Image: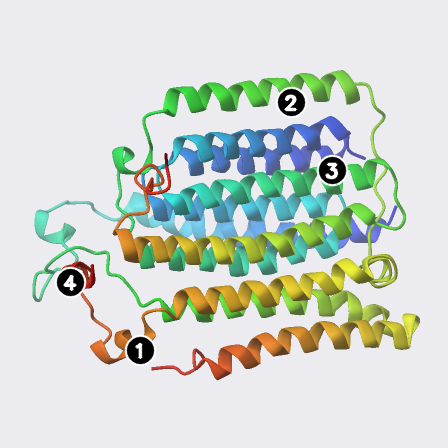
Amino acid sequence: MSVQEITFVIIAVIGGVSAVRMVTSRNVVHAALYLVVTLAMVGAVYLVVAAEFLAWVQVLIYVGAIVVLLLFSLMLTKAPIGRDTLDNQQRGLAALVGMGVLAGLAFLIQDSFGGSKPITLHQATTEQVGVTLFRGFVWPFEVVSVLLLAALVGAVVIARKDDPAGSRRGPDRRAPLRRGSEATRR
Amino acid sequence: MIRLPYLLFFSAVLFSAGVYGVLARRNAVLVLMSIELMLNAVNVNLVAFNAYLRDAALTGQVFALFVITVAAAEVGIGLAIVILIYRNRETINVDEVNLLKW
Amino acid sequence: MSETYYQSYGIVVALLIGGVGLVAVAFGAARVVAPRRQLPEKLTTYECGIDPVGEGWSQSQIRYYIYAFLFVIFDVESVFLFPWATTFERLGMQAVVEMGIFVFILALGLLYAYRKKVLEWV
């Protein structure tokens, strides 16, 4: 085994274990933190396969931004803690399906690429990514900006809904009060 | 030097964990987190095959970049919807949000 | 293969192991040396002062979510700026126009957020 493979196996074990812990954790915040570990390990895998730019994109967007968003929404939804409230009744069936998917994929991988030669890795520079992106992927790139604009407008529209009443009512609105106002509106 | 099945198996583990999470979780935020896990598995595959096929143009990596971008937009809107559901229904358990279920 | 690439990240890994090891040794030594006597008073959130009332979860306002999402959007934009910055000299005017359109469309989003007054910190 080469140095890259040993490094990869260490990273993959940490990432895989924390991924499994994430989907089985009983505490939502712990789940989010396990997700951080998994995402960071995926970034480390990118570093091992010499995709340097993508590794730092992973850190910037996933670990730096999306996880913040997830933690924010956990705070906003006041998620309860405990197995009964976080998991539904299909846990056994879901585990069966998950294991089935894993077994099927493992069989397919071994069957198709089991005897393939080791990959000789070449460093991917940011410049190469940029040339491909701005020469071959011009339209997808521009469409991405429209997508982000649409997402931004959508989030503003959704989240601003209670603003006229909400900002005047003060920051500390309690749930029962809100439920009452909902009831009267209905 | 790294063998392709290693990378693919890692991504398969992430994907299966994501599948389990999507099926077994009630909390909508946790379901979205599991979806992120599955998207990451896809990205690992894209990068692995990019290295395996020795693509000098790095198409796989650019694709992974787009997937990450779209995932950012998706999770932002998804969480906004989840928060809106929480404000209207006081719950984000996906099995209790069944108003449109026939 | 660029050996310098793995060598340079080898230094990062060595630094990481050193840093984690230092913290682990310090905390491990504290755990071994320090006396441990668990009292119910010690396990409360504030050992002296007023006892906390209610639960630890408190709901924050939804407007903070918008800030977080704006951060995500412009984080994504900056990610596209990095490869652009390394190549726009080589690609010339074409790349500049592409990035101009991209930034303009996202600036429209910022303008929308500003006009809808979600940028105001209350």
Amino acid under label 4?
A: Thr
Question: Between C14 and C109, which is closer to the camera in this rendering?
Answer: C109
- 3D distance between C-alphas at marks 4 and 2: 53 Å
Mark 3–mark 1 contact, CB under 8 Å? no
Per the image, the residue denoted by label 3 is A4
- At label 3, counting other C-alpha atoms closer than 10 Å, the crowd grade (few under 14, some 14-19, many 20 or more) is some
Comes first in the chain, label 1 or label 4: 1
Q: Position of residue A120 (x, y in %)?
A: 86, 37
Per the image, the residue denoted by label 2 is A105
- 3D distance between C-alphas at marks 1 and 4: 18 Å
**Tags 2 and 3 on a common chain:** yes
| Secondary structure under the numbered disc 4 in the rendered image | helix
- 3D distance between C-alphas at marks 2 and 3: 23 Å
Q: Which mark is residue A184?
A: 4
Q: Chain of mark 3?
A: A
Residue B61 seen in render: yes
- 3D distance between C-alphas at marks 4 and 3: 64 Å
